[in-house]
Image (tube, rainbow, N blue to C red):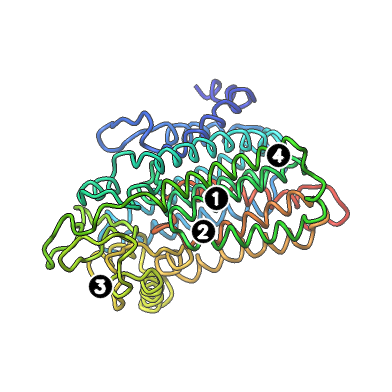
Amino acid sequence: MIGKLKSAAANKEWVEILFTLLIVSFPFGSFLLSFSIGFMILYPYLVLVCILALLALWMPRNETSKLSRLYLLFLLLFFSYAFVGFFFIPAKSYALIDIRSIVLMLLTTWVFIAVRNFLGFKKWKTIILFSFKIIFVLIICFGLFEILSGWHVTGAFTEKISTRGLKDNMSYIPVFLWDNPNNFMVYVLLIGSVIILLESKSRKKNYETITILFIALMMAVVTEARIAQFTVIIISLVYGIARFTELKNSFSRKQVYFILVVLVGLIYVVGTQTFFKEIPHASATKISATEPLYPVPAGGKRLRAKVLDIYASDTILSVNHVSKDKRNSKDERLALIRNGLDFTKESHYLGIGPGQYRFRHDQNQIRHHAFGNNGAHFWLIELLSQYGILIFGIYAGILLWAIVLVTRNYGKSNELAFGILVGFLAFGCAMLLPSAFLILDIHWIFTVIWIVSAGEFYTRKSSTAEC
């Protein structure tokens, strides 16, 4: 048995096939070919990451960057800290969700680093780039279908829309399989950023980048994700200033036509199908003033979307007419951050434990009202409040070290360095957008791709290389 595993681990074709299937399957999670074995649900990504993690034990290894090794060691420490904390906290069911995510994040990182070392960076990034382009097109096409039709995959989001019994702007906001428009934007931004990061051909990269940024901006407008809109605009300005001279002469006529077609098509879809769609009168259905517009499902699951938790006076209100005193995104986020800082101080900067941020909000053990939200909406606060200053400090230090490394050695590989910096901007947005960071697989995958790419500055043979 061990001999067969070693043989499979040394077979590049098998590793390439399994790695490609792993990447292509990740956006679908347990929605794709999942089945129960009693105590857990199995699905393609989970099975593939476990198989590759096992094979990685015997894969031939080349040089690994210090940055990649440090990040892997950090995740081992992260898991150990969360595992020990599990025995000292209440609400262990909440903790198990976070610990499971940390384990999958660790396995994903181990697999991506091992495959990079076995196949080499060039082949590794070719597989990722090819797979991510397919995924990006799929997600955008599905999002456009949702915008045009108002149909969504069944989930808590669509159940709440059907409960309202009205067709309004919220019905046409894309969510794909993630049941939340903010999560949808996280996937669009980070998958698009990986394509920008890994694309090495400058002329091809220019029109791909502009197309991706414009698509991301249109989707951010549709989902009303202001943080995503701001991030795309900042990245666009940085890209335009950095590449102004090159951009003037870098596009062929076919590429210009392609960008214009995409531009006109998306403006039409977003404009006619979202902003100017006829909305039924808000007074069509009345509800009790004492009942929430949407009851919270069993198990404490909450959604962040603006229309989902508002309390109405005597009529269901259109999403565009919700008064700020009933729901204000800025106040919500500030309340969530303040609660996280309270938890940090309360725990003497050791962290209140895995999953306890959500538990404390569900139990209303908070000082600042957060309109029913139970997720931090900010990865650094989620990390700091639950795992303390030690885990937070090491994690932030690794990210800063990677940025310093890239900026100091920018001239060694301008395309890769520029992609890494663009990715960091998008990653900053991804820390703020979703209700929870740790449970989304795109964060595990994007982070290791970003870390490995930044680590390439260690492994390149150059007189200016820093070790």
Q: Is residue 22 above or below residue 229?
A: above
Callout 2 environment at 10 Å: few (<14), some (14 to 19), or many (20+)?
many
Mark 2 or mark 1, earlier in chain: 1
Mark 3 or mark 2, earlier in chain: 2
Mark 1 or mark 3, earlier in chain: 1
Question: SS for tag 4?
Answer: helix
Q: Nearest to the eye among marks 3 and 2: give it.
A: 2
Q: What type is the residue that disc 1 sits on?
A: Ala
Q: Is residue 287 left or right of residue 324?
A: left
Q: Label 1 vs label 3: CA separation?
A: 37 Å
Number of the label disc, if any, that sits on residue 365: 3
Which residue is identified by label 4? 121
Mark 4 or mark 3, earlier in chain: 4
Q: What type is the residue that disc 2 sits on?
A: Ala
Q: Is residue 39 above or below residue 317?
A: above
Which residue is identified by label 2? 228
Number of the label disc, if any, that sits on residue 263: none
Mark 1 or mark 4, earlier in chain: 4
Question: SS for tag 2?
Answer: helix
Q: What type is the residue that disc 3 sits on?
A: Gln
Expressed as whole percent of the image width and height from the top left, the position of residue 414 reads 79, 52
Q: Is residue 158 left or right of residue 19?
A: left
Q: What type is the residue that disc 4 sits on?
A: Phe
Q: Are marks 1 and 4 in contact (CB under 8 Å)?
A: no
Number of the label disc, if any, that sits on residue 216: 1
Mark 4 or mark 2, earlier in chain: 4
